[in-house]
Amino acid sequence: MLVVANFKMNGNKNFFLKLNETYEKLKIKGTNVVLCPPFVYLSNLNIKNKNVCLGAQDISIVGNNKSTGQIGAYMLKEFNVKYCIIGHSERRAIGETGEMIAKKVKSACENKIIPIICVGEATKQDKSSAVKNQVKSALKYLQPGSKIIFAYEPVWAIGSGQVPTIKHINNKIKTIKAEANALGFSPKILYGGSVNDNNFLQLKTAEIDGFLVGGLSLDTNKFCKLIMGV
Ligand code: PGA
């Protein structure tokens, strides 16, 4: 199982420094953990645990010296970042387009950072092919066979306390897999959206390879309970 913590715009230097101690002591078996702090705290995480590594929450598209405020893939590499969340619905909501996401995915892969591409329908009632289209669009500039991960995150489940049924998740996983396979990719697929310490065992019965966790990652005790239990 792969468990990814998306801290979003939360935490402070002290919070992230404390995680070093916590995760160093944690004897994790069979699960890999990716911690994705805000960029400015990447350097505060120096965890000595072979099951824990670093991820970023975004990556810049353009890679030249006229990119004020952007963080390029090679900079993330310097901080030992192995994964990068791309196309989170909170970024799509502030204007990130499919084209931008495709370019970010390409930039990550070119720099050997594994993209965790977020896809998901907007509402519970949405029966459109939105998820399929997001998958296709994100892979537009990528060489078949590149190492990628998808996170199925229904937008309506993020931070809402609502989770889809296992059947619903499995249907979407099937769609993501079919589209990715048809384009020459064999991604791992995570589930994200209101995963907590009470529902993760049930959610784990879906055909998923792990979780993308938001809110719960801020409660270190509960998040560790999830890591040790999956
Ligand atoms: P949540 O967030 O776990 O708080 O619902 C998940 C995410 O936004 O990735």
Image (spheres, grey):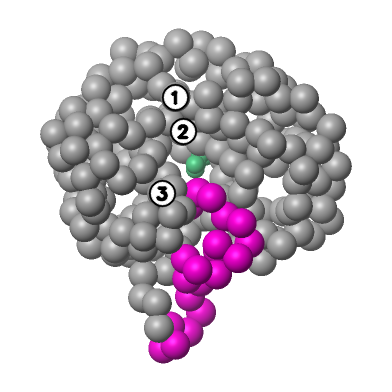
Is label 2 in a helix, a strand or a loop? strand
Would you place residue 192 above or below residue 72 in this image?
A: above
Give me the C-alpha separation between circle 1 and circle 2. 11 Å
- Cα separation, mark 3 vs mark 2, equals 15 Å
* Residue behind mark 2: 192
What percent of the width, then of the height, locates residue 93? 36, 56
Dot 1 amino acid type? Asp
Residue closest to the far bottom: 66
Of labels 3 and 1, earlier in sequence is 3
Q: Is mark 2 within 8 Å of ligand 1?
A: yes
* Few, some or many residues within 10 Å of mark 3 (<14, 14–19, 20+): many
Left or right of 227 in this view: 106: left
Answer with left or right where residue 30 lies relative to residue 133: right
Which residue is under mark 3? 115
Task: Kindly indicate the quadrant of the structure image that contains residue 38.
Answer: bottom right
Frontmost residue, 34 versus 223: 34
Q: Quadrant of residue 78?
A: bottom right
| Residue 164, above or below 215 | above
- The circle on residue 209 is 1
Magenta residues, as a range? 65-85
Amino acid beneath label 2? Gly
- Residue shown at 66% from the left, 66% from the top: 40
